[in-house]
Amino acid sequence: MHANALLAALLAPAAVSAQLNDLAVRAGLKYFGTALREGAINSDAAYAAILKNKSEFGQLVPENGQKWDATEASRGTFTYTQGDITANVAKSTGQGLRCHTMVWYSQLPNWVSGGSWTRATLTSVIETHMANVMGHYLGQCYAWDVANEAVADDGSWRDSIFYRTFGTDFLPISFSAAKKVDPNTKLYYNDYNLEYNGAKTNRAVELVQIVQSAGAPIDGVGFQGHLIVGSTPSRSSLATVLKRFTALGVEVAYTELDIRHSSLPASSAAQVTQGNDFASVVGSCLDVAGCVGVTVWSFTDKYSWIPETFSGQGDALIYDKNFNKKAAWTSISSVLAAKATTTPPPATTLITSVVTTSTSTTTPAPVTSSSSSSSSKPTSSAPPTTALAAHWGQCGGNGWTGPTVCESPWTCKFSNAWYSQCL
């Protein structure tokens, strides 16, 4: 085949008829998901139609709506309007919800980042923030990014108000606080550039061990996957890095995947390379037991964060700005189809609804709440735990430490080695 004909074949529309989430589930993953751009979902019908298609995207994550500056811009005043946009879409479509993020050095309101804190006062701030925000989304989130980007690019601990106040102790403090609020959600550490297996990766391994050694719960590590075309590690190299973390007893996932062109417009050859790079990432997840899913950080170049952050770079996603599927989509669908079984995806949901059966005696914090979809009052303490998993809740799977018995009349049904659910 001539080179031009080969390029044309690789850039042609996908021959695979199934859509990405359906293929991912058939291939053994829990989901293939996307971030949701809060400002676009109600104003762009074409964007909304693709995003809400559960066969294409089985899980959603808010791009910004659950971050600290969006939920508690002023101390003690909690607003969920932006976060509820994604949560409400997921509820209406049956898509799963991944929640993002709690303790992060960036997008912090000044009252947190510029405050003068003792260990005790900042612990209280973290616990109160989690009790309210995670409490508002209690039972809705498959996973929460509890700590985000705590490691600097050179492998040192990143400077932040949290690290300056606690040292690394803020990590087990945060994970323990999160577990008290929602004992049934997966608790993740999330970071970028872990894929390259260097000093930053080594420090992230140490981070997991620090949390575990302190007796705090950590369930997963999120590989953000903000990569560059032509510089993405190979499928086998990526799988090797994933296995460093699953060997510690945690699950892994790609949580913010995009692969950007370093110069634009991208040539046909560069588009093919981009597709191969996406296939390497998704393929590495398929190759590692304990890699549960892949989330792209938006699916269309129309709503990508890359151009405004990296000047002259972009086209990092799997649909173009006009919502046409790119070679990257074709490559992902092909690598999933190669692993997929012919069995239709199970009719399950990633929502883990929790019903509490006791009443907290902790005094509520003096806070106010603003939400377009919830009248629940914020509290200063974590909700109580329950020994039974509720309807739709997770009740088993490799690495699962939560309830394994369902509330009556539901039964724990096996979906795959990593996930059983009360149905």
Image: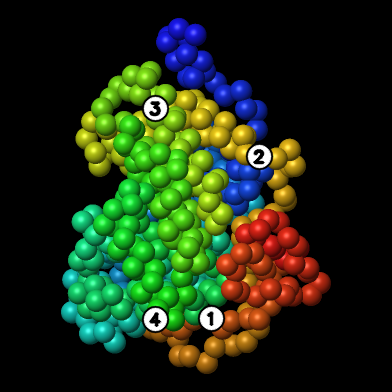
Amino acid type of the residue tagged 4 in the rendering:
Ala
Q: Which of the numbered marks, if any, corresponds to residue 83?
A: none
Amino acid type of the residue tagged 1 in the rendering:
Pro
The mark nearer the N terminus, 1 or 2, is 2
Nearer to us of marks 1 and 2 is 2
Above or below for 374 versus 9: below
- Secondary structure beneath label 4: loop
Q: Which residue is drawn at 61% across and 23% down?
A: 15
Q: Which of the numbered marks, if any, corresponds to residue 214?
A: 4
Above or below for 27 versus 146: above
Between 48 and 23, the residue placed more toward the observer is 23
Q: Distance between the residues labelled 1 and 2?
A: 40 Å
Between 234 and 387, the residue placed more toward the observer is 234
- Secondary structure beneath label 1: loop
Amino acid type of the residue tagged 3 in the rendering:
Thr
Q: Residue at x 20, y 74 (%)?
A: 164
Q: Which of the numbered marks, if any, corresponds to residue 273?
A: 3
Nearer to us of marks 1 and 3 is 3
Residue density around tag 1, few if under 14, some if 14–19, many if 20 or more, within 10 Å: many
**Which color scheme is applied?**
rainbow
- Secondary structure beneath label 3: helix
The mark nearer the N terminus, 4 or 3, is 4
